[in-house]
Amino acid sequence: MQVNIPLKQQVDNSYDITIDTMQKVHFDKKVAIVTNPKVAGLHLAYLLSKISAKELYIITVPDGEEYKNQASIDLILESLFTHRFNRKSMLIAFGGGVIGDMTGYAASIYQRGIDFVQVPTTLLSQVDASVGGKTGINNAYGKNLIGAFHQPKAVFIDPYFLSTLPKREFGAGVAEIIKMAVTFNKDFFEFLEEADLHNQLVLQEAIKKAVETKADVVAKDEKEHGLRAALNYGHTFGHVIENETKYKTYLHGEAVAIGMVMANEMAVSLGFMTVKEAQKVKNLLEKYDLPTSYSIKNIHTFYETFFLDKKSLDASVTFIVPMGIGGVTITDKIDQKLVLSVLSTFGEN
């Protein structure tokens, strides 16, 4: 005996990403801005000059990757319940990638899902974290292992917020821009080699190219069943580095930069990338003072931590490996001995 539940449907999750000075907007509903003390101190007054709502609340959570956890989600949800938010209410993620991921996740689970909008304030979140609907939190086992795909209703990328961005945060964002160029757009990579991203107009063009590149990939593979996983180039290694250093030594983009160098070393070993191409990527990362080296204390422990990665399945580890510059492959067929050999070049046996 069998009963079929017909749920086939077309869902349009399309949304606009505006890269420009934010225009004034009014929301005829309850809205909560989720932010942290640092961003609020620098930019909340500016944001409040741009938005208004039927009822507007501010929810402040602690600043830092170490607070991207269930306790912060509980804090957000408690405020929503206290102020009687309903399914027509909305959240605004106002901050970097950590705020964006947590706000999106809270929105995805509050009363089984409410709308949210992204107003990213770091370069990394403007070019990567705010686009594509990935939301989530960390736990003791790793980064972003709890979460949901929940697309924002809109993204407002305002260059104004980058005026106060610290040098390291800027570099972390550049790492994600380089990531997208290496994997999907050789012309973009060559543009970056010649560009000075400290020039505001050049930076805006780079942001636009990065967002267009990611948007194209997300449109083809929203839930990361294949192609979209390639956007995690550098992340498989980078997430282990973040885990080992308890998220306190490196910014996310810095860990990804090191991870790209490690992935390139693997690509060279496999014959997928030339030494010259790998050096070009390393040079571009170092141009923006990004770290490109890391000392692995125990390569076997490092290897085992790969299995906590969301892309890995059972006994195999999935790696994102560049195919030269402008191409990429996703594979779980790399021999453990080769991986350990690559890792040994970054540390001790």
Image (spheres, rainbow, N blue to C red):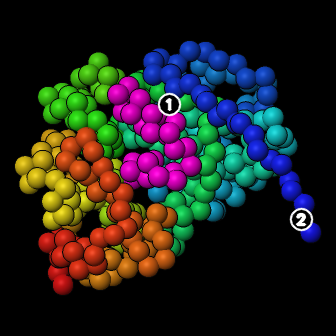
- Position of the N terminus by quadrant: bottom right
Label 1 crowd bin: few (<14), some (14–19), many (20+), radius 10 Å: some
Residue at image position (55%, 30%) is 155
Residue 17 locus on image (x, y percent): 52, 26
Residue 2: assigned label? 2
Q: Which quarter of the picture shows residue 12? A: top right
Question: Which residue is situated farthest in the left direction here?
Answer: 276
Residue at image position (23%, 35%) is 186
Residue 126 locus on image (x, y percent): 43, 35
Residue type at mark 2? Gln
Residue type at mark 1? His
State the CA–CA distance, disc 1 to disc 2: 57 Å
- Position of the C terminus by quadrant: bottom left
Q: Is residue 216 at all visible to an observer of this figure?
A: yes
Q: Main secondary structure of the magenta part?
A: helix
The image shows residue 237, relative to residue 276, as above or below, that is below
- Residue position for label 1: 43
